[in-house]
Image (tube, rainbow, N blue to C red):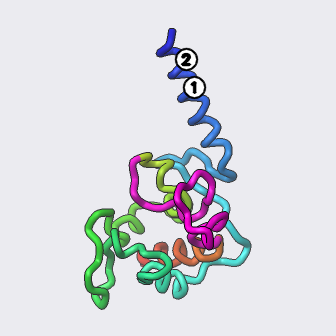
Amino acid sequence: MTLRLVGGALLATMLSLATATTSVAQGSAALEMTEPLVSQPGDPRRGRVIVLSRQSGLCILCHSGPFPEERFQGNMAPDLGVSAQRLTASQLRARIVNASVFNPETIMPTYYSHAGLNRVASGYAGKTILTGQEIEDVVAFLVSLKQ
């Protein structure tokens, strides 16, 4: 009986997480965020700056990619060029917004949520790591790696 209650609670939690995130839909290969976060299209040039920044995006601390000019790229996470080839813009957006939906044990930060975070510096409380526009810029840059 206890196992049934725990299983039911787990299922309810998973369903609430899936429905709480707007425009997240089950895709053929993975969860997706089909709707952009903002109305202005992403700018791949600005997205590249964010991806390579060791101050804002911090992507290359864990990821590597087709950036021969960048020294000391990460090796703890998938290569961004490979991910860009394999995933759609909607799938990339969903992973950047909240990678823990795909892997609850991930160390990748939740770039577009501030709920449920612990030990956040007061200057960052209630703020997301990246804005909706910055996420769209990063998605546009990653999509540009396909070409």
- Decide whether the magenta segment is chiefly helix, strand or loop: loop
Q: Residue at x 46, y 82 (%)?
A: 55
* Residues in magenta, as a range: 105-131
Q: Residue at x 33, y 84 (%)?
A: 67
Residue 127 is covered by the magenta coloring: yes
* SS type, badge 2: helix
Residue 59 visible in image: yes
Q: Residues within 10 Å of mark 2 (few under 14, many from 20)?
A: few
The reply to whether callout 1 and callout 2 are in contact (CB within 8 Å) is: yes
Q: Residue at x 54, y 48 (%)?
A: 27
Q: In the rendered image, which quarter is residue 76 located in?
A: bottom left
| Residue 44 image position (x, y, % from top left) | 53, 83
Q: Which residue is mark 1?
A: 9
| Residue 66 image position (x, y, % from top left) | 32, 80
Q: Residue at x 62, y 73 (%)?
A: 123
Q: Which residue is mark 2?
A: 5
